Image: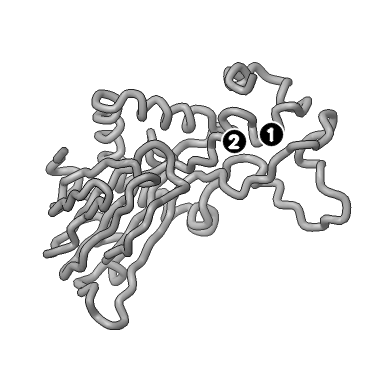
Amino acid sequence: MTTPDPVQEVYHRIGIHCGSEFFEDDSTRDDYHFMSSHVAIRNRFSEQGRGAPTDAHPSKVQKIGVRKVNHHQRLPYGSTEMRQDPDGCEILTSILSPVSEYLNTQLKQLLPVEHGVLTDYVESLPLAMESPAYPFLGFALNLCVATSAHKDRNDKAICAVVPFGEWTGGELCLYELGLVFDVKPGDIIMFPSDKVTHFNLDFIGKRGSFALQSDVRMDDWLLYRNHWDHNIVRHTYDDPASQAST
């Protein structure tokens, strides 16, 4: 699918915001590297509540002999970038917003099952948390990127790749499907990134992309509240997810 103007506006605004980090590059040079920044809500490495007492608040519970307790990872949490640079992440979220809104509309119409899975995640977030890339839980901003072959096994359902810039080469390859996409600014590619091996070919120029995805470990939160669903605090409010966890 193609959407013309919003992606060109993304290119313009990223150039202003990222400055010297977004430049003409050649991915075949010896010291090639790329910049990647993640603005996302995650639930991986969450501390599970299996076996925890039912009558104590989770923020007061810790294992015997353990001094350092990461209480905030008992809930879904923002990526390192969101915690360390909230203002910068807010700017990137604003830049992506027209594209994510367009994606939300298209996903709802073309892939309603996948759209429902993704929105279930977002709508289950605690403490009025908002996703930076609805209906996904977040995005990665990749600048001057040519990736090696990989699968993103922490992704759920589907991802969306939105390239922008001015470059030659850099085709997106989906290995098992035998597909090679000569992607251009404004193209949007959606595929199950956890199941399909994908990579970019070498490029020359200014090539950037947003990759929107959701963390598969949100299943633990959606269904079981990270297995704190037995806790007394969990039952002090009316939560529709309680039906899903039975």
In primary-sequence order, the first of circles 2 and 1 is 2
Please tell me the numbered disc located at residue 155. none
Q: How many marks?
A: 2
Residue 86 % position (x, y) = 48, 53
Secondary element at image label 2 = helix
Disc 1 target residue: 227
> Taking the image as drawn, is residue 11 in sight?
no
Image point (22%, 76%), residue name: 28
Which residue occupies 32% across, 60% down?
149
Would residue 182 be found to the left or right of residue 191 on screen? left
Element assignment for label 1: helix
Viewport quadrant of the N terminus: top left
Distance from Cα at disc 2 to Cα at disc 1: 7 Å
Q: Does residue 22 lie above or below 176 as drawn?
A: below
Q: Give above or below for 85 relative to 225.
A: below
Residue type pointed to by label 2: Asp
Disc 1 marks a residue whose amino acid type is: His
Name above or below for residue 140 compared with residue 218. below
State whether residue 186 appears in this view: yes
Label 2 crowd bin: few (<14), some (14–19), many (20+), radius 10 Å: some
Query: Residue 188, position in %: x, y?
Result: 21, 43
Q: Give me the residue at 20% from left, 68% from top.
A: 202
Residue 59 point in image, percent of width and height:
76, 41
